[in-house]
Every structure is written in C-alpha cells, then in structure tokens.
Image (cartoon, rainbow, N blue to C red):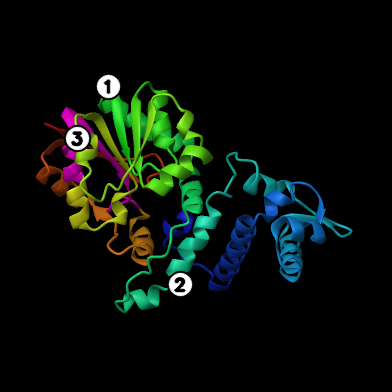
Amino acid sequence: MAKMWTSNEEFDFETARDYASKLVLLGSAQRAGIFEALSEEKDIAALKSMLNADERALFIVLEALCALGYINKRLDRYIITKKARAHFIDQGKDYVGGALPHFLDIMEAWIKLPGIIRVEKPENEERDVAAFMNAMASKPDKAVEEVVNYCLKRKKNAENMLDLGGGPGKYSKAFVNRGLNAVLYDLPDTIDYVRTEFGLGNIRNLTLKKGDFTNEFVNEFAGESFDIVFMGNICHIYSEKENRKLIKHASNILNDTGMIAIEDFVRGRSPMAEMFAVNMLANTEGGNTYTEAQYREWLTDAGFRKIEVIDLADKRSQLIIAFWG
C-alpha cells in the first residue's frame, strides 16, 4: 500500500482490481486462521472442525489459494507453501500477516467514502484491537531504531520517556533497551492486549499505564516529569484543535529541558501524506495530515523552541523534535 500511495504513475485498472481482490482474499484467510492451521497437512474435514468453518467456503477459498500458489494440495490434503509461510507464519523480514487483517478494516472504511464526501460521518465501529496492534507491531525494527537514535542524539542525558499511544510498545522497548525508563500510556483495552500478547508486562523498566490522552491526562502523572514525550503516528488521527491541546498537555509533564518528539507524515515532505489523509477521512472524525508550518506553529504556541524536522531514511515519514523551557 505504501508504494501505491507514494506513486503518481498511471496504473492499469484491471491489474489493480485483481491485486485488490487477492489482498482481500489473503487477508481474509489470515484472519480466519487458515494459514496457521495449514502449517501441517490437513483435509477439509479437519480444517472445518478446527476453525469452525463452512465446508463450501473452505473448499472455494483453499482452491483459490492453491491457484495463487499460497497453498499446496496433495490428494485431498492441503498445506501452506514455503512462500506463504514466509509471509504469514515466520515473522521475519517478509512477514505481512500482522498487517493484512488491519488492511481489511481500512478497506471496509474506504468503501464508505462516497457517503463521507457527502457529509456523512465515519461510523464509530468497535475497534479490532488485535488487528490494529499487530499491524502497528509490523513496523521494521530498523525504522524504530532510527527514530530512537535521533531522539537520544538530541537528548543525550535522557533518563525516562513517555510513549503516548504507544500500542504494541516497539518504541518503548527500544528506549528501554537504550537504558531509559519508559511509560507506555494507552487505552485500557490496548494495554490489556499488549500486556499479554506482546509480553510487555514482563519487561523491566517499562510501566504500562491505562488512560485516554485525548482528555486532560496531566493529573494522572502528578509529581512526575519526563525527559522525552514521544508521539508516534498519532497526530494524524486528530484535528488541528485536538493536536494543539495534546501538544500543550505534553508540555505540562516535561521537565524543564524536556523534549517532545513527533513522528508522522508531514504534508510537503512525505510522499504518503495526501493519500494517508484520505485514510484518516475514512476512519476518523477529524484526522488529517499536516504541514511543517502547522507543526511549528502548534509547538511555538505551546512554548517549545529549537524545532527541527527530520526526514527519516525511507522519506515517507518525518520526525519533529522540539525542546521545552
């Protein structure tokens, strides 16, 4: 999806339609548990029992996946192919299984764009926490380390940090691995999920805290202050007014020389920004992507100085750093 969003080249509509169909099929198979279930050979009867699935649906989907080369069939038994194992089971560099179920949720929202353009509001459906967290966790470790390196080069004496809306904890863990104490602050259902599913409850020097940072959260950190407040890919979820408030709240829990670090898609610098804003239109009530000038204005009005905007290695997203006091 990122490549599609960063390209303004003409594309073949028929090919694009076929790719979309394949992605929906693969994401549905992953979400239904088919690929994991077929890590060992099984027939349809065994799959039906294991997945509590419909026999006709299984046959049609399995045969289609065979035709695409993601499943092999021998007599009446099926097993995942080596290619598919790399994508959907082995969590290496080619793994996409964590992101595809979330892609289905995104596409479901995008299909409602005609109504949204005609002033209808996006439906506030119940979040699929597992899909969202696994998608966020699929971010490459190398990209996370790049951000953490920049932060610690700019704030060399940092001892602690707050990860606002940190979800699966990739950034929190990276900061902890560099010797900092970290607090991951997110919604209660998110914290409950990542505590167990991602093992975050057992990491020394990482504190998990439940709350809603869209509300006034300063009182929840009474007596605490942080060297770094990190906001990774959350500003695009909210309106300009909400981001101003969020940045101001963050300033209130930084120490006298603390640093705010914001990672996001900056309009005018990220080739993904405009298309990602459409994703926010489809999925949020006020979300958008914003320009460097807007971020600078919000930070300056909140009392920050030494504002710096850094293009990250892949050029798709930026890191905005500023100091308080």
Query: Which SS class for mark 2?
Result: loop
Q: Where is mark 3, residue-wise?
A: 253
Q: Which residues are magenta?
A: 247-270
Q: Where is mark 2, residue-wise?
A: 111
**Relative image position of residue 258 (x, y in whole percent):** 19, 30
Q: Residue furthest right?
A: 75
Q: Quadrant of the C terminus?
A: top left
Left or right side of 66 for 198: left
Indicate which disc, 2 or 1, sits on the residue closer to the N terminus: 2
Query: Which residue corresponds to the image point at 31% horizontal and 54% vertical from the top-left?
Result: 236
Asked if residue 139 shows in the view, the reply is no
Q: Amino acid at mark 3?
A: Ile
Q: Where is mark 1, residue-wise?
A: 156
Query: Which SS class for mark 3?
Result: loop
Q: Amino acid at mark 1?
A: Lys
Q: Amino acid at mark 2?
A: Ile
**Foreground: disc 1 or disc 3:** 3
Determine the CA span between mark 2 and mark 1.
Answer: 46 Å
